[in-house]
């Protein structure tokens, strides 16, 4: 009954905010803020793959109440601090003009940002209006993230990251101390599994759906009505999309599925601070980037409280460090 009441209230808010919101739903279905650079888009008929980005090979806030415990000797902890928490050398000599077209709350935009931040690549950000998407009308690609590097357009999060990585490491090395196969395995796991448990958790209830769209009120150069339509109509639509995803992937308990995924990742570390041993590899950055936009939503708070992932997440925040975003 409470869920029905919440949904009714959400619908009334949507109608009161903008009479045109339902006519704009199809446009929103082409631009959900939690969608990203998969081979197809969230609300379209091909939507299911979109949250999964590519096939296997937004703001970082401090975490509180971190769950889980890892024990290291004083010497090991000192070494870890010196090695793992040092960002890569600044890459401004390789990348001179980098612009990210994004939705602030999009997991895959955050996946790209985690890479840019960790590798010290300065970048500008253009927040895309999820309704009209006027900011990317210049591109034939109508989804985010889009990254332009010295005028060259790059699309789809995994392909963007691989392309940038090759420019940084032209010798073709994985750049990590773990095996290439292990790294590829977990990069594939992010795109084929982890992303599919996020939506049913983010939009589990009407309240959580609205919480996930709060960012729209403070990001981007959007008018008041645009913000309200995007928030309420978007939250309503995504609530029902999440229910379809839950059924498609046979998820019976949203939170339990999220917790199991977090524990699976911690188990994959095998006691190492990162999958890349002393410092993050591409799989670490992918998991961190995808999880970063939910960290301070209810789903993310629950995940950290009820699983062992908190220590790793905290280490990743320190390793990735401050944002390399530059003001336009």
Image (cartoon, rainbow, N blue to C red):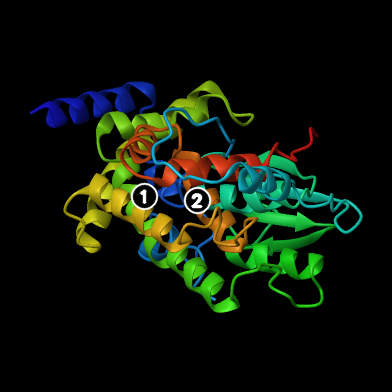
The 10 Å Cα crowd at callout 2, few under 14, some 14 to 19, many 20 or more, is many
Q: Position of residue 14 (x, y in %)?
A: 32, 28
Based on the displayed image, in which of its 4 quarters is residue 266 positioned?
bottom left
Q: Position of residue 76 (x, y in %)?
A: 62, 48
Q: Residue farthest to the left? A: 1
Q: Position of residue 2 (x, y in %)?
A: 12, 26
Would you say residue 317 is visible in this rendering? Answer: yes
Dot 1: element? helix
Q: Which mark is residue 101?
A: none
Dot 2: element? helix
Q: Which mark is residue 198?
A: 1
Q: Are marks 1 and 2 in contact (CB under 8 Å)?
A: yes
The 10 Å Cα crowd at callout 1, few under 14, some 14 to 19, many 20 or more, is many
Q: Earlier along the polypeptide chain: callout 1 or callout 2?
A: 1
Would you say residue 103 is visible in this rendering? Answer: no
Query: How many numbered discs, if any?
Result: 2
Alpha carbon separation for disc pair 1 and 2: 9 Å
Q: Is residue 86 left or right of residue 209?
A: right
The residue lying at 39 percent from left, 59 percent from top is: 267
Q: Is residue 60 above or below residue 150?
A: above
The residue lying at 35 percent from left, 41 percent from top is: 303
Which residue lies under the disc numbered 2? 290
């Amino acid at each position: 009954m409470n869920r029905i009441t919440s949904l009714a209230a959400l619908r009334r808010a949507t109608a009161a905010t903008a009479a045109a919101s339902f006519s704009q739903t199809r446009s929103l279905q082409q631009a959900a803020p939690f969608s990203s650079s998969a081979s197809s888009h969230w609300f379209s008929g091909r939507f299911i793959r979109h949250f999964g980005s590519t096939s296997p090979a937004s703001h970082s806030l401090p975490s509180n109440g971190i769950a889980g415990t890892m024990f290291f000797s004083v010497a090991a902890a000192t070494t870890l601090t010196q090695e793992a928490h040092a960002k890569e050398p600044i890459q401004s000599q390789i990348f001179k003009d980098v612009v990210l077209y994004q939705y602030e709350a999009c997991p895959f935009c955050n996946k790209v940002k985690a890479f840019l931040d960790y590798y010290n690549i300065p970048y500008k950000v253009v927040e895309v209006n999820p309704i009209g998407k006027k900011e990317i009308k210049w591109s034939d690609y109508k989804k985010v993230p889009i990254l332009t590097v010295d005028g060259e357009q790059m699309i789809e999060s995994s392909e963007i990251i691989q392309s940038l990585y090759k420019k940084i490491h032209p010798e073709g090395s994985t750049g990590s101390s773990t095996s290439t196969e292990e790294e590829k395995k977990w990069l594939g796991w992010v795109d084929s599994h982890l992303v599919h448990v996020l939506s049913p958790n983010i939009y589990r209830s009407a309240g959580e759906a609205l919480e996930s769209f709060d960012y729209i009120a403070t990001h981007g150069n959007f008018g008041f009505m645009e913000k309200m339509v995007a928030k309420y109509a978007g939250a309503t639509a995504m609530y029902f999309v999440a229910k379809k995803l839950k059924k498609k992937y046979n998820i019976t308990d949203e939170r339990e599925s999220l917790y199991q995924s977090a524990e699976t990742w911690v188990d994959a570390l095998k006691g190492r601070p990162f999958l890349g041993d002393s410092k993050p590899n591409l799989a670490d950055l992918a998991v961190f980037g995808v999880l970063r936009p939910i960290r301070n939503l209810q789903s993310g708070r629950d995940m950290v409280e009820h699983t062992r992932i908190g220590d790793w997440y905290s280490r990743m925040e320190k390793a990735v460090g401050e944002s390399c975003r530059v003001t336009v």
